[in-house]
Image (cartoon, rainbow, N blue to C red):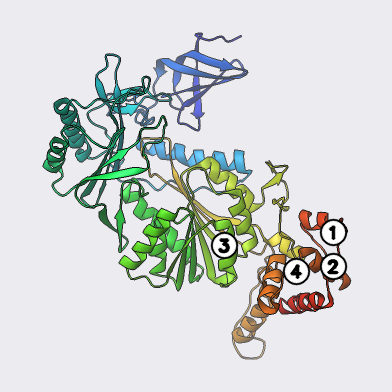
């Protein structure tokens, strides 16, 4: 029987999902931070529940040959990194396995994961600095990073993940605090002025934001002078956040000096970035990732791109340079407005920014575009793709998706739904051995083949090391809809007797090409546009039954037919039949 504070010994079997070592002792699995696979160690049991426990290294008997001395003096104390003790190749191997394991465990997906695309500079790569300001046990102001799983600030003067400019900024800000007497915010008493220091560098331009509980800073001229001393053309803001919250920024920004934004260029697109603008923190890996994503977008001849979760529009703009049309759909009004400015700044008349929910806007776009010519980019926040958006994608008819994710867990969940390996049952996702309808409120499909063709196959999974020395990883995934029936034959092409005519073959293939899925919503939209009135899905179902067509109704439509309801008028029936002919269902 294992108890807390017991000292145990064992061999590290593998990495856990957070980069800790996994050791199995007495039918229990222990997660031990900073232990590497293959090492023989002893560790103290910190916590145990059931057959799972957590430990702390006491001694390493047999160190791994891939162990390295951390470059940071507060490694293991600061919560910023967790892998400096491992050689860089081992870090990328861990991240590849992390993605593979999440896909299998969460999404029920067995797929090849390509080697991680590395970062050529695994230190000093971050273009953004974000530091809390607080007080130590003696009430003195401190600037640093939070310790792992706490709000205790570990004071630092330099971070190995940031370039030299960050060290100069930290030094200048500490000097300002000492000279001005500005108080640091105390999370216990909820008193104090300075809460965070946030800075971003893009193409040699700097933007600094001081988060405080009040608009006015003591001796702000001293701060401006120090900032301009290290960054002569920098922009600076004061952000007011007086709420008891973990959110860094408050609602209001006040200019301190310089312009309201900084300028950057990426893949030929000129863009502006403000204090709240999302820009990937690793410029080198971002360029590699975006180039590959765009290459995959146009690999199959697509000329229309829809960028879901488009944010400030940078990736949409890159796509617009190569596409006939590029749509950017973004729910946040401020970000969508930034995308519109980006469009104008780069003269992209074929870039169409839409502010709204992707689940609602995607069907509207797809009524105008041909599915076979359209590719969808999905780059969601860490929480992943909204369930409603996933179902809208499945119903859209789009045949190709390029996904970017910073969270293997939510990526695996979302891919499970898109591939049909996960289905929803009473609001919960369960693994399915066969690809069946995953949506509780699914749109009814016109024929059974369409039910089986709505899901996607995974073509490519490629992780990118956007965050060296940490447990985090960015992943690019390409999906497409392909026929599951294939044959292999040897043929001789030409126009002579006994040869196959390429022209005739192309004509026959075009005739056999699967048509876009027709849903009840498509039929309703056609009738409303052509005849000027709406029809209920139950009326469409009734006409289909009268015509002897196969039925695969959505649960909601079937439920409503159980209630007393009048029948469609003759005018409605004629319109429904005309729509069914239009979509070549009859």
Residue named by callout 3: 362
Residue 306: image x %, image y %?
50, 63
Residue 281: image x %, image y %?
34, 45
242 sits to left or right of 203 = right
Q: CA distance from mark 4 to mark 3?
A: 22 Å
Residue 121 visible in the shown view: no
Label 2: state its secondary structure: helix
Vertical placement of residue 237 versus 567, above or below:
above
Q: CA distance from mark 4 to mark 1?
A: 14 Å
Few, some or many residues within 10 Å of mark 2 (<14, 14–19, 20+): some
Few, some or many residues within 10 Å of mark 3 (<14, 14–19, 20+): many
Camera-nearest label, 4 or 2: 4
Q: CA distance from mark 2 to mark 3?
A: 28 Å
Residue 410: image x %, image y %?
54, 43
Residue 140 visible in the shown view: yes
Mark 2 or mark 1, earlier in chain:
2
Residue named by callout 2: 542
Residue named by callout 4: 535
Vertical placement of residue 129 versus 346, above or below:
above
- For residue 561, which numbered disc appears in the image? 1
Q: Residue at x 48, y 66 (%)?
A: 305
29 or 522, which lies in front? 522
Q: Residue at x 13, y 35 (%)?
A: 222
Few, some or many residues within 10 Å of mark 4 (<14, 14–19, 20+): some
Mark 4 or mark 3, earlier in chain:
3
Few, some or many residues within 10 Å of mark 1 (<14, 14–19, 20+): some
């Amino acid at each position: 029987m294992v108890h807390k504070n017991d000292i145990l010994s064992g061999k590290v079997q593998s990495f856990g999902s957070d980069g800790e070592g996994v050791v199995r002792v007495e039918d229990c699995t222990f997660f031990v931070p900073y232990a590497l696979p293959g090492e023989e160690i002893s560790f103290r049991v910190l916590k145990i529940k059931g057959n799972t426990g957590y430990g702390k290294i006491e001694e390493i008997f047999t160190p791994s040959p891939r162990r390295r001395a951390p470059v940071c003096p507060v490694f293991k104390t600061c919560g910023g990194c967790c892998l400096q003790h491992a050689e860089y190749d081992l870090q990328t191997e861990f991240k590849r396995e992390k993605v593979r394991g999440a896909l299998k465990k969460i999404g029920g997906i067995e797929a090849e994961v390509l080697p991680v695309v590395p970062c050529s500079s695994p230190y000093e790569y971050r273009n953004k600095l974000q530091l809390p300001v607080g007080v130590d046990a003696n009430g003195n102001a401190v600037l640093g990073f939070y310790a792992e799983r706490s709000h205790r600030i570990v004071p630092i003067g330099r971070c190995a993940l940031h370039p030299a400019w960050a060290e100069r900024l930290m030094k200048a800000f500490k000097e300002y605090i000492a000279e001005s007497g500005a108080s640091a915010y105390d999370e216990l008493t909820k008193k104090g002025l300075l809460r965070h220091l946030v800075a971003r560098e893009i193409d040699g331009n700097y933007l600094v934001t001081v988060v405080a509980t009040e608009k006015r800073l003591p001796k702000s001229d001293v701060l401006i002078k120090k900032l301009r001393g290290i960054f002569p053309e920098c922009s600076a803001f004061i952000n007011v956040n007086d709420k008891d919250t973990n959110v860094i920024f408050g609602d209001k920004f006040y200019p301190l000096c310089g312009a309201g934004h900084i300028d950057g260029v990426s893949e030929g697109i000129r863009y502006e970035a403000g204090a709240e603008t999302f820009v990937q923190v690793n410029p080198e890996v971002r360029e590699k990732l975006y180039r590959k994503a765009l290459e995959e977008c146009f690999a199959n001849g697509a000329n229309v791109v829809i960028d879901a979760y488009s944010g400030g529009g940078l990736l949409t703009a890159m796509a617009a340079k190569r596409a006939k049309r590029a749509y950017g759909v973004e729910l946040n009004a401020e970000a969508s407005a930034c995308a519109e400015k980006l469009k104008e700044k780069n003269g992209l008349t074929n870039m169409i920014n839409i502010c709204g929910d992707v689940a609602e806007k995607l069907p509207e776009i797809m009524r105008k575009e041909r599915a076979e010519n359209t590719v969808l980019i999905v780059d969601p926040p860490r929480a992943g793709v909204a369930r409603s958006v996933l179902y809208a994608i499945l119903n859209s008819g789009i045949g190709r998706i390029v996904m970017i994710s910073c969270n293997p867990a939510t990526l695996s969940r979302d891919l499970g739904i898109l591939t049909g390996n996960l289905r929803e049952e009473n609001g919960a996702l369960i693994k399915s051995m066969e690809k069946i309808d995953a949506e509780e409120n699914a749109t009814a499909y016109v024929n059974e083949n369409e039910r089986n063709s709505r899901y996607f196959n995974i073509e490519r999974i490629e992780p990118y090391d956007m965050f060296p020395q940490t447990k985090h990883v960015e992943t690019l995934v390409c999906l497409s809809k392909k026929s599951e029936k294939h044959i292999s034959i040897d043929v001789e092409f030409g126009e002579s007797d006994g040869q196959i005519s390429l022209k005739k073959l192309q004509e026959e293939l075009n005739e056999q090409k699967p048509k876009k899925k027709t849903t009840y919503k498509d039929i309703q939209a056609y009738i409303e546009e052509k005849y000027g009135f709406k029809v209920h899905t139950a009326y469409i179902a009734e006409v289909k039954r009268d015509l002897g067509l196969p039925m695969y109704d959505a649960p909601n439509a079937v439920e409503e037919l159980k209630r007393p309801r009048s029948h469609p008028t003759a005018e409605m029936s004629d319109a429904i039949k005309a729509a069914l002919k239009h979509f070549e269902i009859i």
